[in-house]
Amino acid sequence: MGRLISIVSGKGGTGKTTTTANLAIALGKYEQKVCAVDADLTMANLSLVMGLDDVDVTIHDVLAGEAKIEDAIYPTKYENVEVVPAAVDWENVIKADPRNLPKVIGPLKNRFDFVLIDCPAGLQMDAMSAMLSSEEAIIVTNPEISCMTDSMKVGVVLKKAGLVILGFILNRYGRSENDIPPDVAEEVMEIPLLAVIPEDPAVREATLEGIPVVAYKPKSKGAKAFLQLAEKIIEIGKWVSQK
């Protein structure tokens, strides 16, 4: 039985989709069978980041009752990684009911070791439906107090909803002298710090190339941080299963 993990944030622009893509590929490198699901029904950036173009069936079709989830799973060029993409046009957004996300995504854990769900930012209905499709959550935040405050609100709501909050990722650390240090961030967030992803030009280069940095420059600082994150997530799962 696989693990359903939502990748969430309190506000947009934290690097949530980049995190989803890189964590998926990193887990795949550790021989884990992974499905990355684009549940951000209005922005739909995951397929672009993963280099997946021109698909016939998306999660919007599944949510509209016009296709089965099996029809929307696509292989990628990355070992052990598959993707459920979302559509980019407004016509598909209108027809898809986000409230169906939990029952559509849930069965995927019978086919994969990890199902990573790229969720919309915030706490609106579509975001909540995506986040509640999972059993665990990872919060992505930046080293700024306003961003952390929003992230904390999401964490509180998800805890009350019964999700296991694995911890948070401090993303793009080091781009400003005013960045909140990791130890202070952990005190503020009051949940475990899973990884510090440094500000790394290689990540931006990889995004422009449409190739996640773990595959684009695997020896870069950013890639190494995502690989360490994947290892930690796997270890957390082993520890939980032994309890």
Image (spheres, grey):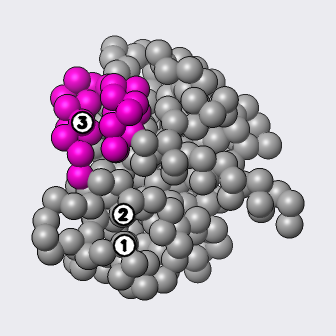
The verdict on residue 205 being magenta is yes
The residue to which callout 1 is attached is 182
Question: Element type at marker 1?
Answer: helix
Q: Observer-nearest residue: 103 or 136? A: 136
Residue found at x 45% / y 59%: 195
The answer to whether residue 219 is left or right of residue 143 is right
The answer to whether residue 6 is left or right of residue 173 is right
Question: Element type at marker 3?
Answer: helix
The verdict on residue 147 being magenta is no
Name the residue type under label 3. Answer: Ala
Q: Looking at the picture, how far across and down is residue 167, in whole percent?
A: 52, 67
> Furthest-right residue in view?
242
Q: Which residues are the magenta region?
A: 199-223
Local crowd size for mark 3, using a 10 Å CA cut-off: few (<14), some (14–19), many (≥20): many
Quarter of the figure with residue 31: top right
Name the residue type under label 2. Answer: Leu
Quarter of the image that includes the N terminus: top right
Name the residue type under label 1. Answer: Pro
Q: How many marks?
A: 3
Q: Is residue 204 visible?
A: yes
Q: How far apart are the two marked residues, 1 and 3, measured between alpha carbons?
A: 21 Å
The residue to which callout 2 is attached is 170
Residue found at x 26% / y 39%: 203
Residue found at x 56% / y 20%: 79
Q: Looking at the picture, how far across and down is residue 177, in whole percent?
A: 13, 70
Q: Looking at the picture, how far across and down is residue 141, in whole percent?
A: 34, 65
The answer to whether residue 219 is left or right of residue 241 is left
Q: Main secondary structure of the magenta part?
A: helix
Q: Are marks 1 and 2 in contact (CB under 8 Å)?
A: yes
The residue to which callout 3 is attached is 202
